[in-house]
Amino acid sequence: PLGFGRRILGPLVPAFQALYPRIDMRLRLSEHVLDLLEEAVDVAVRMAILTDSSLIARKIADCQRVLAAAPSYLARNGTPTVPDDLLQHRCLPLRYPGSAQFRWTLETPDGPVSLAVGGSLDADDGDVLTEWALRGQGIVLKPVWEIASHLRCGALQPILADFPPQPLTLAVIYPHRRFLSAPTRLFADFMIEHGAKAIRDSLDGLKLPPPDNIAAS
């Protein structure tokens, strides 16, 4: 996740190395899912709906997500009131080879609903999508922490609060190995402590409307 990499992971990497100066760090940022074994990556940080795999996943934090749009977009196009309304709106999906982000899954009282959203704009960089949304170009699906500052000031407004997107898990990922290297273990421990704090700090003072429909179901 580039947003996490740029805003949280990037500053934490030199902080970690300051504690362990003999450990060399090489940071790679990508929205794509890397093959850790094929690309010889020791440890990754992923934000996803985690499934069983051959990799070890240690959770950093649960990440609530939100649908949001600029007031200017909503003034021109109206505000969606039910999930199916998104099919008539200009959505801004994260799209790259193999990506499933063009399908948005929302929770409803009758269970999850998956929608193949679309529009005339998509990108493989989440920060670009946020910038487009701020310019009134459409609706984005984002982790709350990533756009918290825009939500606080009203530059983006949450929509469809009664039908929240499925949350993601932010986790440290590394391959199964008989003997886990000390640098990998130390970095994983560091990220679980400091990454979780950074997420909490980014959400400080932000309150979103509760999903009434889900709470009543």
Image (cartoon, rainbow, N blue to C red):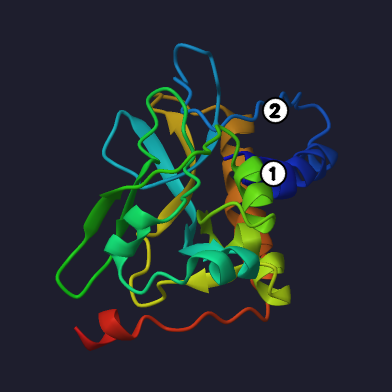
Residue 70: percent from left, percent from top: 62, 65
Q: Quadrant of residue 113?
A: bottom left
Residue 31: percent from left, percent from top: 54, 33
Q: Quadrant of residue 216?
A: bottom left
Amino acid residing under circle 2: Leu
Along the horizontal axis of the image, is 20 left or right of 102? right
Per the image, label 1 sits on a secondary structure element best described as helix
At a point 67% along the width and 81% down the height, the residue shown is: 205
Vertical placement of residue 96 versus 18, above or below: above
Residue 109: percent from left, percent from top: 19, 75
User: How many labels, in total?
Assistant: 2
Q: Which quadrant of the rendered structure holds the N terminus?
A: top right
Check residue 89 in the rendering and tell me which mark sits there, or answer none. Answer: none
Q: Residues within 10 Å of mark 1 (few under 14, many from 20)?
A: many
Q: Residue furthest top?
A: 38
Check residue 27 in the rendering and tell me which mark sits there, or answer none. Answer: 2
Whole-number angstrom distance, CA of label 1 to CA of label 2 = 9 Å
At a point 63% along the width and 57% down the height, the residue shown is: 136
Vertical placement of residue 150 versus 142, above or below: below
Per the image, label 2 sits on a secondary structure element best described as loop
Q: Are marks 1 and 2 in contact (CB under 8 Å)?
A: yes
At a point 61% along the width and 62% down the height, the residue shown is: 145
The residue to which callout 1 is attached is 9
Q: Is residue 147 visible?
A: yes
Residue 125: percent from left, percent from top: 60, 36
